[in-house]
Amino acid sequence: MQNTVAHPASSTSNPASVLGGRIRHARILVGLTLKQLAQQAGCSESMLSKVERGQASPSLSALHRVACALNTNVAELTSLDDTPRSPVMRAHDRPVFEIGSGRNGIRLERLVAPTRGQLLQGDIHVLEPGTAADETIQHHGEEFGYVLEGTLELTIAGERYQLNAGDSFYFASELPHSYRNTGGGILRVLWVNTPPTF
């Protein structure tokens, strides 16, 4: 599990504590013990306990597994408390959600403010050189992406694809997938999921 930090424009709370509280609340609502959730999400009970207390944060793939076990998604667990008042999001107001650090550090620039119940999610995934989301994930839905900058290695159902700026992709989310920055510079990918996943 890695550090997770959210930077919405108006956030004043500790993001790890907010995330931990939401996970604990969702766990109680579905009637799972800490041990049961840890088993279903494939993580240790002690680490999950730390996450719920705001003392640790899961990696992107671990957070996804926890969300799936809770019958929700990452977007709902990290959504803004306030419903957006405008259909427009200005660049300087864009919430940023950081997951992990070093080789596993991914920054999600929210293009659509995550709110409960929405059907579509759009982010810009930003990865430093050598960074990877190596653990494969799969879930219901569809994904579309467009490489804005850098070199993306996308693995879908065991097959690797090398994409450069200007290239795009689409696949069914049920296929196991992972990605990494294989270039020497920063990677920026416009990524759209339906339904919301991250």
Image (cartoon, grey):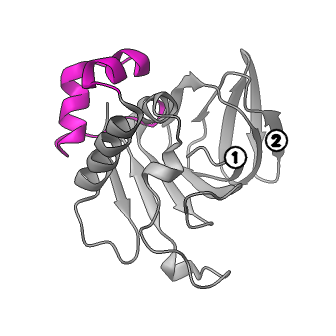
Q: Residue 115 sits in which quadrant?
A: bottom right
Q: Residue at x 32, y 72 (%)?
A: 11
Q: Does the magenta stretch include residue 28?
A: no
The x, y position of residue 187, in whole percent, is 59, 49
Q: Which amino acid does label 1 sit on?
A: Pro
For the point 24% across and 38% down, which residue is it?
A: 51
**Which residues are drawn in magenta?**
32-61
- Where 115 sits versus 129, above or below? below
Residue hosting label 1: 195
Q: Residue 5 carries which label?
A: none
Q: In this view, does 193 lie above or below 7?
A: above
Left or right: 88 as drawn, with respect to 93: right
Secondary structure of the residue carrying numbered label 1: loop
Crowding around mark 1 (Cα neighbors within 10 Å: few <14, some 14 to 19, many 20+) is some
Q: Nearer the viewer, residue 185 or 22?
A: 22
Amino acid type at circle 2 is Phe
Q: Main secondary structure of the magenta part?
A: helix
From the top left corner, tell me how far across and down residue 114 is, in percent.
55, 61
Mark 2 or mark 1, whichever is nearer to me: 1
**Up/down of 75 relative to 180, above or below:** below
Question: Is 11 situated left or right of 169 in this image?
Answer: left
| Left or right of residue 191, residue 170 in this image | right
What residue lies at 42% left-to-right and 18% top-to-bottom? 40
Dot 2 or dot 1: first in sequence order is 2
